[in-house]
Image (cartoon, grey):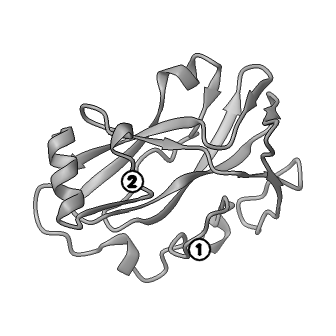
């Protein structure tokens, strides 16, 4: 089941969900709006290799905004740091963002119970579009879990995205064995 606004607030009060900074006006009926942070990144090489560490170049969104172009994958980051200890967070784009032709995640919309970090966004666009630091970019929806959890993400050996960062984090696929 999806958590309602009152259930999200109760989970925040109990420390089961953490959102920093938290702004009550960003809480919807059954979601919480998150905002684009000031850092973006792009991969240095045009051809990416799943078995290698693909390096990124960091970009900063200035007060004039930043123009995204089709054909480039941008890694962004949420301003909000989140923790989820009793539910599964899903990150979805806001409809207003989608209507600008912006996708905020390629495949990674679901977080794990125990994820504690800023969200890295996999941003692409249908046509050139200017984005700004602090603009609403997505919404977190929380689903309740059924059963005990044995393997929280933040305690899982080998979890690749546990280091807290206000900057986008590149793919760590190369750390997998395949």
Residue 22 — which label? 2
Q: Which residue is the site of mark 1?
A: 177
Tell me where residue 177 sits by quadrant: bottom right
Q: Earlier in the sequence, mark 1 or mark 2?
A: 2
Specify the farthest residue to the left. Answer: 147
Q: Quadrant of the N terminus?
A: top left
- Residues at discs 1 and 2 in contact (Cβ within 8 Å): no
Say few, some or many: other residues with alpha carbon within 10 Å of mark 1 (under 14 / 14 to 19 / 20 or more).
Answer: few
Write down the quadrant of residue 153 in the picture.
bottom left
Q: Is residue 75 left or right of residue 144?
A: right
Taking the spot 34% from the left edge, 50% from the top edge, the residue there is 89
The answer to whether residue 49 is above or below residue 140 is below
Write down the quadrant of residue 154 in the picture.
Answer: bottom left
The image's mark for residue 75 is none
Measured from the top left, where is residue 69 in percent x and y? Answer: 82, 30
Q: Residue 168 or 50: which is nearer the viewer?
A: 168
> Can residue 39 be seen?
yes
């Amino acid at each position: 089941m999806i958590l309602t606004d009152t259930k999200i607030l109760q989970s925040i009060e109990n420390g089961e969900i953490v959102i920093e900074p938290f702004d009550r006006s960003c809480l919807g009926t059954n979601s919480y709006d998150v905002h684009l942070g000031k850092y973006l990144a792009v991969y240095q090489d045009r051809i990416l290799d799943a078995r290698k560490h693909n390096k990124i170049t960091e970009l900063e969104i200035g007060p004039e905004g930043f123009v995204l172009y089709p054909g480039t994958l941008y890694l962004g980051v949420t301003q909000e740091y989140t923790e989820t200890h009793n539910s599964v967070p899903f990150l979805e784009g806001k409809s207003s963002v989608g209507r600008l032709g912006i996708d905020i995640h390629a495949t990674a919309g679901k977080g794990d119970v125990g994820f504690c970090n800023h969200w890295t966004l996999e941003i692409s666009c249908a046509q050139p579009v200017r984005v700004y630091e602090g603009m609403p970019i997505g919404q977190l929806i929380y689903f309740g879990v059924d059963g005990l959890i044995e393997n929280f993400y933040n305690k899982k050996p080998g979890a690749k995205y546990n280091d807290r960062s206000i900057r986008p984090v590149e793919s760590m696929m190369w750390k997998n064995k395949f």
